[in-house]
Amino acid sequence: MPNVEHPAYPAADLLHLEGLVPCRESQVSMLLSLFGERQQFSFPSIFIYGHTSSGKTYVMKTLLTTLQLPHVFVNCVEYFTSRLLLEEILTQLQSCPSGTEQTSPVRCDTLNDFVRLFKQALASQELQDQTLYIVLDRAEQLREMEPNILPAFLRLQELTDRNVTVILLSEIVWELFRPNIGCFEPFTMYFPDYSIGHLQKILSQNHPPEYSADFYAAYINILLGVFYMVCRDLKELRHLAALNFAKYCEPVVRGEANERDTRKLWKNIEPHLKKAMQTVYLREISSSQWERLQHDGGEPGQLKGLSAHTHVELPYYSKFLLIAAYLASYNPVRTDKRFFLKHHGKIRKTNFMKKHEKTSNHLLGPKPFPLDRLLAILYSIVDNRVAPTANIFSQITSLVTLQLLSMVGQNDQLDGPRYKCTVSLDFIRAIARTVNFDIIKYLYDFL
Amino acid sequence: MSTCSVSKGCFVFKPSTKKRRLSDKTAHDFRCTSNDSEDTELRFVTCQSLWNQIKSETEQIQENLNKQLLDNLVSFLSRSHSDFQEKTTDWTCRMKFREIPTAALVLGVNVTDHDLTFRGLSDVLQDNITPYVALLEAKDCPGIKNLMQKLMGQLMKCDIDVDSLEDEDCVQVSQNRIRCSMPSLISWYDSVTKKTNSETPSKKRNSSSRHWQSPPVVVIFKDMESFTTKVLQDFIVISSQHIHELPLVLIFGIATSPMIIHRLLPHSVSSLLCIELFQSLSCKEHLSTIIDKLLLTSQFPFKLGEKVLQVLINIFLYHDFSVQNFIKGFQLCIVEHFYSQPLSVLCCHLADIKKRVYSLSHDQCESIRRLPSFRRYVEKQESGKQIELLTNNSFLKEETEKLLGDLHVYHENYVRILRCLHVFTSSLPKYPLGKQIRELHCACLENRVWETEEYESSLQLARMLNKTDLVTMLQQCVEILMSSSGKEFDRAVEKLKEFLTQFQNLEAEASQERDVSVSPQKELQKKTDLYHLQKTLLELKESRRSKKLTKFEMLRFEVVDYIDSLVRRYLAPADERALHEIVYFNGAAVLRGHLNAAPRTALHTALNSPHWYLKNQALRCDGGGISNKAPDICIVYKLHLECGRLINLVDWLEAFSTVVMAAEEPNADAASSDQVDDVIHARFIRAVSELELLGFIKPSKQKTDHVARLTWGGC
């Protein structure tokens, strides 16, 4: 008894479809009932949302291709301007039913042109009797195009007076799309996340030909046990499953265990998967490096991950500039006198502080400071005299391009630029240690 | 077009049609300084040929240094799309997510050097892997649209370069007509690869030896840090969707640390990448190699003086870490030397010296006689020779040739012994004479190194070295000295070898000695009560103090003394040699002015004491007073130095008019002094707006009729 039923389509096709989209039967039957028969007008626009890899794109694609419904499928990230997007739709439309080579490139600058050309294309392709589906994947990008694009797509059926349905796929909710001036409300539909059972079912579906389905399902079970807490992305999980499967099979290949010896297999694979979670999953080392390690039987400890290389070598004055910038960012201005003047007198912290300054500046984040303050601090923390040469100033700029400092307020570059220091405490301590500067002594928070 | 200026504004670019005449002009510039035309020509040619030699040498060095990195990258690239080539249908390959192969190339903070590395990289890639290499810079790609345009422009143009001119008409599509999207890129890629595949067999063999059937498309992001997150993310997302059709490889040029990837890209995007890390040589090592190959060699006749070298090294270590800038500075030294020193004609290879010395004119001979080092040399000679040297030109020429030859030999020996000394000093604890050979070199150039305290303490430390270290050092020294071609060091080598054999002989005797030394300690173990222990310890100490030196210690002293004698003989500073001015460049102040300019100081000098630049003594004023003859802007500047953070414009104008009026009409009537003259008012406004343009003040909204000062400090 198939879950997906519709009188308009042959049962065999539907059965095949159901096999292709496990765990999404209810959504598919919902969509089918919305679509109706081929020649029937459907709802003008449908908005489908759901979390990353909840099968939106996949379900739409399989549905439309298996039932051979005429459709156009466009990714809005890829066609980043409205012109590219519209032209792509038209080009796909021209080659839509027959799948022939694309004809002459179309030029389409505005929506007005689009509607006209769209009608022409439909007429030439003899699609009047069927509903045409335009699927816009990653539809949140539409909001960044001209303001008329999104409302126009939502009521394209009305504008063109043709049998067309626009389907928007997105990861965010409809409320974030709605323009201020209002628009046609699409039919919204939610794709819920796959549960762990769903994931298990989907992942075990395509097992390698050399091994039995049960064996692979047991492996997936272990994999999900480790990774489900941190990752529910189906694509990522499938990738990880493929990467580590060879290691799982190792005892079986060597003949130390048979396929049913789950405990032994589990013992073999579990630490390995945990290690994978800390390295490959975080992209600390690449998957090809991971595979090579596995192949050679080496320890992942030999390969240093990306975050192991945090050390940055800087010229001498750049180091001091960075330290001065850090001090300027995290110390209140009034304390400069206490830190950098020789005869500052003793200032008790409790009396000295205002109420709002009792919270740690490190919790509040860096504050912007003017260039003058940076240079003043620099001159007082460097032992020997520093001439204000062009090199010093260009070093500040290069620190900005290296994203160690950031400029606040772009337009004020000539008279009074303000900067912020963006490096972490650990980083600046490492830098200060190389020049024998005890930065903790100069930080107000650690007084 | 781009400028290297940091400020925003309009820049004029003149067409560069006069490139060919440039060299003529430079030669002419050289000529301006002296009246001796034939000589300047020669100097210019010498300078040019010397620089060309040095340039090719540095390029060679850099190529060798980058070789390892480039090899690694090439092997990574050839590996990266191997499955794309084979079109495997393996289960793992099907299930695995196709990631974009990415090389994270950590190059260090010396951004100015990166260009060269990338140029080398793209050349190597184009020779070995793929013709399709695109170099992207952040400033060209503020949006994904610009990025795609730039990328396609570079890729498709490079295709035209590869293809011959025969099918130019069909490829030459203007960039505007191609749609800047991934599908058009893919269709272009398909057509290009298909074309190469269907070429005539002879041609195909030729191309396939270099590239494969479907070479990867390499996209290099030169400055990863400066790209905006959105552009990068979009590009990666788009290209990951087409990775099956277009074998793309990304290379990220990273200046800081690879952590920046995680900072720029969220996990959902970085999970599309297969990142491998590559690290280039650190710039300090790079500099050491350059110094080693350019300065510590007798290959080039031109040498740097101590101060100059210190300036160059300081700029490198304190400011930019840029090897490129170091070489540029070195070039400047060469040009400056040949430009300012008329006798630099003689700064040439040993083979040419004789000819050049004998073609010297009388004036030039006179200028040799005027050289301080030569005068010192003359004073040391006996009186008969002194007269000859000062009056007889041909005798002087003979002597000059001899002295220059000596200088050459001196330098050759100097380098050898310097290296030997470095072998010793670089392994001492705390490095009293510096860890790097460049520090030692500077110390030796500065003054007599053996008179310094650091040298003394390093000799002390060397006298405490253990045997194995000492032996390996001696062996290294022997190797260094053996590599010299001359016979100068034959005796030294012999002596060192003798030391080595003596050390070996010691080993045989050592076993006997050990027995002797063990016995008192055995005694020590027997004693248990405190009194006896103290007594024996005191005795031990006593005996050790008075004990004769062991044979090893004697030998060690001998070795250190011998090294010391070598140092004293060969490492005398160059300023003590006669005629060193011809070969050594010592204009440190000039160089500093050129390379480490202080714009703020210069501006202050110009405004505060205008006579400095205008060369007009009338403008000079002493004791902090303000001369009314100075330009208006100087008066305004000086007055503003006396103000605080906010300046009242009315007071300022008042003061200005007082200063200006002071000389013009000393006996003006009181009525007109109340009202400021319109002309003066206008002059004041102009001067103030000039000051604003220079960035000293800006209009303030805090108080009406006030401007804010942007600099601090004052008179």
Image: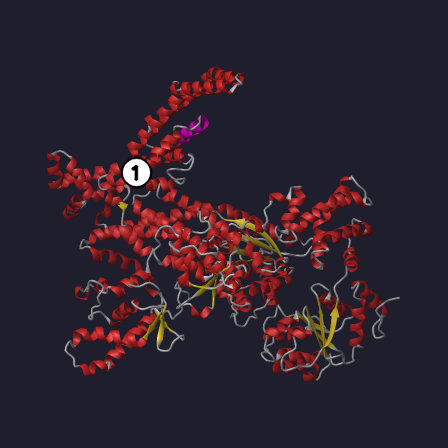
In the depicted view, which residue is nearer to us: A143 or A117? A143
**Residue A145 falls in which quadrant of the image?**
bottom right
Q: Residues within 10 Å of mark 1 (few under 14, many from 20)?
A: many
Q: Quadrant of the C terminus of chain B?
A: bottom left
Q: Is residue B169 left or right of residue B21?
A: right
- Mostly what secondary structure, the magenta segment? helix
- Quadrant into which the N terminus of chain B falls: bottom left
Residue displayed at 75% across by 79% down: A43
Label 1 resides on the chain identified as: B
Q: Amino acid at mark 1?
A: His
Q: Position of residue B645 (x, y in %)?
A: 36, 68
- Above or below: residue B658 compared with residue B92: below
Count the numbered circles shown.
1
> Could you tell me if residue A208 is visible in this image?
no
Asked where in the image residue B553 lies, by quadrant, the reply is top left
Q: Position of residue A439 (x, y in %)?
A: 47, 51
Residue tagged by mark 1?
B411
Q: Quadrant of residue B539?
A: top left
Q: Nearer the viewer, residue B631 or A95?
A: B631
Quick check: B445 left or right of A48? Answer: left
Q: Is label 1 in a helix, a strand or a loop?
A: helix
What x and y, as percent, mark residue B663? 17, 73
Left or right placement of residue B637 versus residue A139 in this view: left
- Residue B598 shows up from this direction: yes
Magenta residues (range): B467-478
Q: Nearer the viewer, residue A31 or B470?
A: B470
Query: Residue B371: percent from the left, percent from the top?
Result: 19, 44
B461 vs B182: above or below: above
Q: Is residue B496 magenta?
A: no
